[in-house]
Amino acid sequence: MIKVGILGLGTVGGGVVKILQERSADFEALLGEPLVITCVMSRRSHRLEELGLSKEIYTDSFETFQKSNPDIVVEVMGGDAPAETILKALESGKKVVTANKALLANRARDFMGHSKGEFLFYEASCCGGIPIISAYEDGLTANRIDRLLGIFNGTCNYILSEMTQKGSDFAEVLAEAQRLGYAEADPTFDVEGIDATHKLCLLGSLSFQGSVPFDAIPSQGITRLSPDDFKWASQNGYTIKLISIGEREGEGIFAGTFPCMIPSGHPMAHVGGAFNAVYIEGDQVGELMFYGAGAGERPTASAVVSDLVAAAQSRARVLSKKVFSEGKSLSVHSDRDLQFFIRLKTPDEVGVLSRLCDGFGQQGISLRSVDQAPPFDGQAEIVFITHPTTGGNLEKALDSLQSDGLILGDVFSMRILDL
C-alpha cells in the first residue's frame, strides 16, 4: 500500500480524490500496490461525505497530518500555510506533489532547489492539464531553448477572446467571467498578469537553465484595453493576447508578461477561450506548441495524479533540482527594441499632431503610422504605431509630451510582436 496524504479538498483536491477512486484498479495494476488516501487536511470538512471519504482520515491540523506519515504528500491547498509541511516532508525523504505556483515561484530554491528537491513534483503548477514540466524533464533535454512564449492565464485569455469576438468592454466581460466561474471574486492576480508571471518564472528557469527571479520579471495586465484597440488590431491583421515571453539575450534573457498584438496567422492567436498554450523554439526540434485546458477540476487534477503516479514509481525531477539548486540566477532584461501601439488623447488644435510627431522624433522614435479618430468635445484620440524602439525611449518621449500639455489623461501603450 502506498499511503497518500492530501492537503486541500477544494476544486482540485476533490478532482484528485475522484480520479483516484475511479481509476484505483488501473493504478494498482500499474504500480503493483494500491494508492490509498490515509489522511486529508482541509478547511472543507463538509466535502468528506460528498467525496465518499471517511471522517477518520480527516484532520484540521498540520501537526496531525505530518504524524499520519504518508508516503506521498499531495498539496493542493495553495497559499503559504503548507510551506513548512512540504519542507518537512522533503527533509524526511517523502515525495511531494504540489500545484502551488505562487509559493514555488517566490521560493524556488527552497523547494525545487532543496537537497531532496528531485522528489518534488509540480506539473499542476503550470498550465493545468498540459504536461509541460514532463516535457522539459524528459522530452526536450536534447535542445537549447531560445524562445518561450506562453498564454498562461485562462481567465485573461477568455476575456480577451470575448472582447475580440464581441467587441465588449473589459468590465462587462470580466463580470461574465466571474459569473461563469472563470474569474475569482478578486481577479487581481489574473488580470494584472501576476499569475501568468509565476508560471513564466518557473518555465523560463527550465527553458534557459538558470533561476529566473520572479520579482525581476515585469507584469502588465489587461484592464486598460478598450474595444477600439481590438478593432484596430483586427483591421490590421493582429490579435491581442496576454503573452508571457522569454528569449535569450546575451548572458541573460528578455522576459515579461504583457498584452501584445501578435499576427493573426500565428498559432498562438488561435488559442481561444479559457485555454492555455506554451510555444517553444528549440535548436534541434524547432517550433513546438502545447495546447490545452489550463485550469479546472479535472485537467489540473489530471496533472496532480500523473505526478502522484510518477512519484510512486520513484521517478525524479532531476532537471528541476539542477536548475534551481546549481544553476546561476539569470539576469532579466525587460526592455528591448519592439514596435509599439500607442493610444492617447490630445487637444483638438491646429499644430498639435505635428508637435507630437516632433516629440517622438526627438527621442529617436520613428513612426510607422498615425490614425486619428474624429474629434469629440475638443479632444482628439490618436493611435500611433512606432518602428522598433525601446520602452525606455517611449517613456521619455511621452513624459516630455505630457509636460508640454500635448497629452490629455493617461496614455495606453502595447507591444507588437511580429512573430
Image (spheres, rainbow, N blue to C red):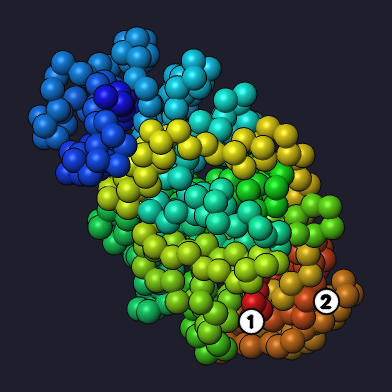
Question: Which of the two residues, 144 or 374, is positioned nearer the viewer here?
Answer: 144
Report the residue marked by disc 1.
382
State which quadrant residue 291 falls in.
bottom left
Q: Which residue shows up at 58% across the image and 76% down it? A: 262
Q: Quadrant of the C terminus?
A: bottom right
Residue 398 showing in the rendered view:
yes
Residue drawn at point x = 16 percent, y = 31 percent = 47
From the image, tell me which residue sits under label 2: 365
Dot 2 or dot 1: first in sequence order is 2
In this rendering, the answer to whether 245 lies above or below 302 is: below
- Distance CA(mark 2)–CA(mark 1): 16 Å
Asked whether 243 or 221 is in front, the reply is: 243
The amino acid type found where label 2 is placed reads Ile
Quarter of the figure that contains the N terminus? top left
Q: List x then y, in percent, for residue 249.
A: 80, 59
x and y percent of residue 145 in the render? Answer: 68, 60
- Residue 227 as seen in the image, left or right of residue 44: right
